[in-house]
Image: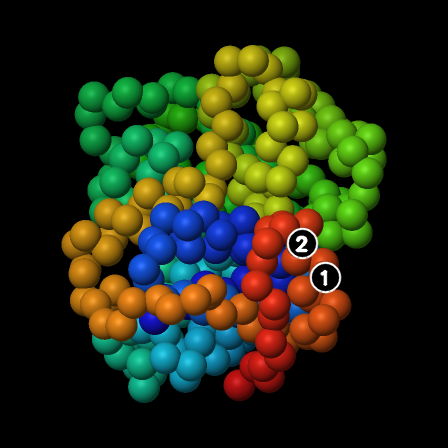
Amino acid sequence: MIGAFDSGHGGLTVFRALTERFAAVPFVYLGDHANAPYGNRPSEEVVDLTRAGVETLFRRGATLVLLACNTATCVAARTLQQDWLPTSEWKGRNVLGIVAPTVEAATQTPWAVSAPQYPQKYNTDTVAVFGTTRTITSYVYPEEIRKRCPKVVVVQQIVADLVTAIEAGADETELDRIVKLGVDGLMAQTGGLPPHRAILGCTHFPLVEHLFRKHLPVFTRILSQPEIVADSLEDYFHRRPHFIAGPKRQGPPELLTTGDPSQVSAAARIFWPDAPKFAHIDQI
Ligand code: DGL
């Protein structure tokens, strides 16, 4: 079974794409709604909560957990992969994040290549990153991009209120106002020069991709994570088929929450109109 973990609802944008792409694979999703959002929390808390979420999914039978959350990935993925997992009781299982496939798409460079390769196709381009406060202040995206393509200019922009507004079901005018503010902030940093590519580095932002499209310059290519992550996971499963060997999925994927399942199931419709119902689980 493959697990996906997110602070709340946002990871459903990625999870939905995965369940559609891998129709026979059993999936379980855990949203830590009791502690969401993570985007403004101190890093230590994000690491502890993410480890607890991963462990809950491992106990539930997941052999691989995808952190379907940019904040959790930027803040906790490396610590969990390098420091915690190898010394834990879960050796042989794995934790993946959603930053690696996004950086691969932005740089056209495999994650395994962690130093510049020449000639670089995009080596002087400008890449924009939109995200939560914690994702942007982690500097993970610029660091990982520049490791591979040192001449790429990375411009980051916090779009602080967008997560809350999307979750609150804000109307199109309000969402448009917040996205425009974010894009204006970004363009002020580039001095009006259009970025070549823009990473929507928050799980909620694909829901308003059309508004980013409206306000970003026409030449800027938007990198949206659900498809990028599904492509990357497909490649990963080809290389490591044992993660998806075993019984095929019967029925819909399982959705778990640390919050109130009826409230969460109702709110999840913004992210996935036909989402199955959530069930409650306590984090370990
Ligand atoms: N899932 C988070 C992300 O992708 C957004 C919500 C939160 O801040 O918890 O950054």
Residue 154 image point, x, y percent: 49, 31
Q: Circle 2: is it few (<14), some (14-19), or many (20+) Cα within 10 Å?
A: some
Q: Circle 1: is it few (<14), some (14-19), or many (20+) Cα within 10 Å?
A: few
Residue designated by label 2: 269
Residue type at mark 2 is Arg
Q: Is residue 173 above or below residue 13?
A: above
Residue type at mark 1 is Ala
Q: Are marks 1 and 2 in contact (CB under 8 Å)?
A: yes
What colour scheme was applied to this rendering of the protein? rainbow
Q: Which residue: 37% across, 48% down?
A: 21
Q: Nearer the viewer, residue 15 or 36?
A: 15
Disc on res. 215: none
Q: Is residue 173 above or below residue 239?
A: above
Q: Which residue: 73% across, 52% down?
A: 167
Residue designated by label 1: 266
Asked whether the viewer can see residue 277, the reply is: yes
Q: Secondary structure at mark 2?
A: helix
**Count of marks placed on residues:** 2
Q: Is residue 56 above or below residue 35?
A: below
Residue 115 position by quadrant: top left
Q: Which residue: 78% across, 47% down?
A: 169
